Structure formats: C-alpha cells, structure tokens
Image: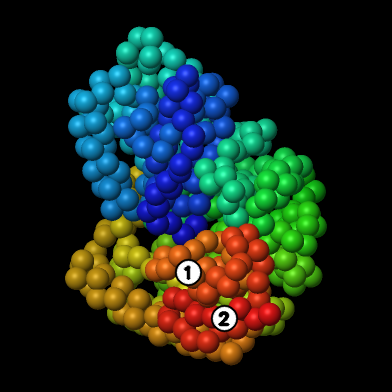
Amino acid sequence: MASSINFRSVRPVLDSAAPHVFIETYGCQMNVNDSEVVLSILQGAGFTLCSQPEDATLVLINTCAIRDNAEQRILGRLDFYRLLKKKNPRLIVGVLGCMAERLKDSLLEHPAVDLVAGPDAYRDLPRLIGILGSSGSKQINTLLSHEETYADISPVRMDPGGVSAFISIMRGCNNVCSYCVVPYTRGAERSRDPESILREVGEVFDAGYREVTLLGQNVDSYRYGDTGFAQLLARVAQVSPQLRVRFSTSHPKDMKDEVLLTMASYPNICRHIHLPVQSGSNAILEKMGRRHTREWYLERVARIREVMPDCAITTDVIAGFCSETEDDFEDTLDLMRTVRFDAAFMFQYSERPGTKAARHFPDDVPPQAKTERLEKIIALQSEMSLESNRRDLGRCFEVLIEGHSKKSDADLMGRTSQNKACVFPAAGHAIGEYVTVRVLSCTAATLLCEIVD
C-alpha cells in the first residue's frame, strides 16, 4: 500500500470528568483506520478524545515503519513528548502500530515511552493502561494474531461530519516482498467477515459519509468462505448508488478480470486502480519477490483499459533497489512511458532491518545514483500527470465535494471517479454534495474547474 506521513487533527468537545487521549497517526490509510479502532476501544474504557497533547492524560502515536525517514520523524516526536512529560509527569505516552511491532522492547528504552502495543494488541490497551497507572511499570504487548480483524468493533471516526471513511477488509500480508516489513509488523493475511464489513459500510453511510475506501495490503486476495473480493465489492456498491466505493491496494499478480468486470458494472465503484509495479525490470522484480513480471503487468494494464477505458491507473515505483543497473533503471522508465500512469508514489530504496533484502542482498546502489534516478522518475511522472490532466480539458466530471481548497475558503475541492483533485468556486454548494464540473485548466496535480448547472 502507498504510504506517506500524515497527521490527523481533530476538534472534539472535552469531557472534564473523563481521562483524555490524544492520538497521532502516521503512515498509510490502514493506520488511520486502526487509530479509529483504538479510539472506539478506549472510549469504551472511559476515555474522551482531545485535540491537543497538552490536554491529554494519555498520548498514543500510531506509527509507520515502511521507511527509515518515517521512523526518524517519530523518534523526533518522542523527544517532544519527553519534554512535555517534564511539565506533566503523570502523562502516559504509548507507541502503537508497525514501528512498535518492529522495535518492541527497545522502544521502552526511550524516556518518553511508557507503553508499546503492536497492531494486533489494541483490545489489550485498557488492561495495559490500567496496570501502568497502578504500578508505574512500563507495559508491552506485541503478540501477532492469526485471527484478529477487529470485525466486531465499530471504529469511531476522527472526522465526524466527514465525507470519506476508510474501512479495513483484511489485515496482514502473505506476499513477503523482499524489501517490505509489513508481513513482519502486521502478520499473516486474514480476511474479515463480509457481514461485518457491510454493517460498517451501512453505519458510515447512515452517518452521512458518501465515500468508502476498502483497505487491505492486497485487497485482490480477500477471501472469506465463498466470498472473494469481486463479490464483496459488488455487495458494498449495492448499499446505495449515492455511495462511492474505492479500494486500495491491488497486487498485479492477483488482479483478476472478475474484479474489473464488477467495477464496470457499477457506476458508483470509482474508476481508479492503484497497481504498484515497483520496477520495470524482470531481474529486479524477481529479486524483490514481487511474483509478477513486466509482461504480466503490461497485460493487466491492457485488460483494465479494455474493460474500462476511462479508468485511471496509478502506481508505486522504487528507485535504486539492490543491484539495480542503469539498464534495469531504463526498463523502469520505459515501462512508465508505455503505461502513461496518471500519478505515482515514488521513493528511493530504504533498507529495512529484518527483511529478506536486508539479510541477503547488499544495498549496493550509491546514494547519489538513487537520488539521480528518483529525480528522473519524478520528472517523467510529472510530465505524464500533466499530459493526463490536459486530456481532461473541456470535459465534465461528477465530483464529491470533500472540503475547501487549501488556498482559498471561497473555493471547494473534490475528486473525480478517477481520483483526480478538482478545485472550483463554491457557488453556494457544500461539503458532501455531488456536483458536475467542467475542466477549464490544470496543473500536473490539479484540475481547475467550474460548476456546470
């Protein structure tokens, strides 16, 4: 799944009679959903969410471990909490999620950290907090589970009154790509009962949300009894034609025609597939353990466009993986030019301790070469994103209004079915409405539009 550092801010009403928890979330959409599960569990234990760490009796940092720079930012944040604890010695600070699972007891050596809990230990938080509060001894639970999906827990959304909700349909990953820590930090793959997913979809729709994103490390391998991902996708789309349905992330080796045909059958399933390729070189793909070839990937792209000509395709690309030669790198650029991706998440390879790559493959591409290759990838994708957006000039799209433009409260922002960001004058419309817009101009990142009556 594509991953970036995010911070979710909230403005709840404080309940002075209850202990207050402040939650910071870093990383992917899965972590956002996990934080909402944690909040549900803690509210059941009597906690109230607060919007500032200075108001909290408990601070929880839900972490990302997919790249070293993500962990370094979190360690820097812990230094801030070390200083805050000097002002408030009763403050409890906990580290959750993938970084907690990867580093385990070593995190407890940080003077700010009182509590460490992995992704499958969130039900245990009230007990751990209780022991910590009564004994003062630091607590940890990083046991991984083969069954835990939190299917019976209704997450408490951190953006009440919002438009889009993330819903986890599965946990863990069985792919074990050689560069990735996820199988080690989130455990083996297990799918969630579809009835619990549909219950949650219904809850968020009844609460006013008009878009859901179904989440999994590899949604295409979802399987619960006789229900595969295509069947689940259809059932979610049938909840209401007014509910947009997105999903992330797909794996090329498991992207089946059945899913594509289901998408094409329901107008409210968004025409966007995020299909990480990582490299255009078969030699590098094999070393990465991706279990797909360049040829297979291109065939899947061709099939997507045959079934849904209007479907946007985005991807992930890694520059400078172990032993990547200039020829391997040129293969990646060539694949990008062939596919003409609408957008991409692009990264330098960052060796992660404990992965197969770290154990078996030397990180032998010089840092300068990684940087130069990444810059070329970014430049090429910027050209292609602009080209993609220019093709939309003069076209009309239905967008779901998600919020105000970052630059002006007089403008609104929404996304097309293809996940392209549109900015347009408010003209009396409100967040949560569907409107039709016409594209007037664009940048590589944004469509600049007007509302069409």
Residue at 50% from the left image edge and 52% from the top image edge: 29
Please state which amino acid type lies under the numbered disc 2.
Glu
Quadrant in the picture for residue 192: top right
At mark 2, the secondary structure is strand
Neighbourhood count class around disc 2 (C-alpha, 10 Å): few under 14, some 14–19, many 20 upward: some
Quarter of the figure with the C terminus? bottom right
Q: Position of residue 328 (x, y in %)?
A: 36, 77
Q: Position of residue 355 (x, y in %)?
A: 37, 49
Please state which amino acid type lies under the numbered disc 1.
Ala
Q: Position of residue 248 (x, y in %)?
A: 57, 59
Residue at 64% from the left image edge and 33% from the top image edge: 153
- Lateral position of residue 47 relative to residue 109, left or right: right
- Lateral position of residue 122 relative to residue 236, left or right: left
75 vs 389: above or below: above
Q: Earlier in the sequence, mark 2 or mark 1?
A: 1
Pick the residue in front: 175 or 24: 24
Numbered marks: total: 2
Look at the numbered discs 2 and 1 and tell me whether their residues touch, using CB distance below 8 Å: no
Q: What is the basis of the colouring in this image?
A: rainbow
Q: Nearer the viewer, mark 2 or mark 1?
A: 1
Residue at 62% from the left image edge and 42% from the top image edge: 190
102 vs 143: above or below: below
At mark 1, the secondary structure is loop
**Residue at numbered disc 2:** 450
**Residue at numbered disc 1:** 410
Q: Position of residue 387 (x, y in %)?
A: 47, 87
156 vs 253: above or below: above
Residue at 43% from the left image edge and 27% from the top image edge: 20
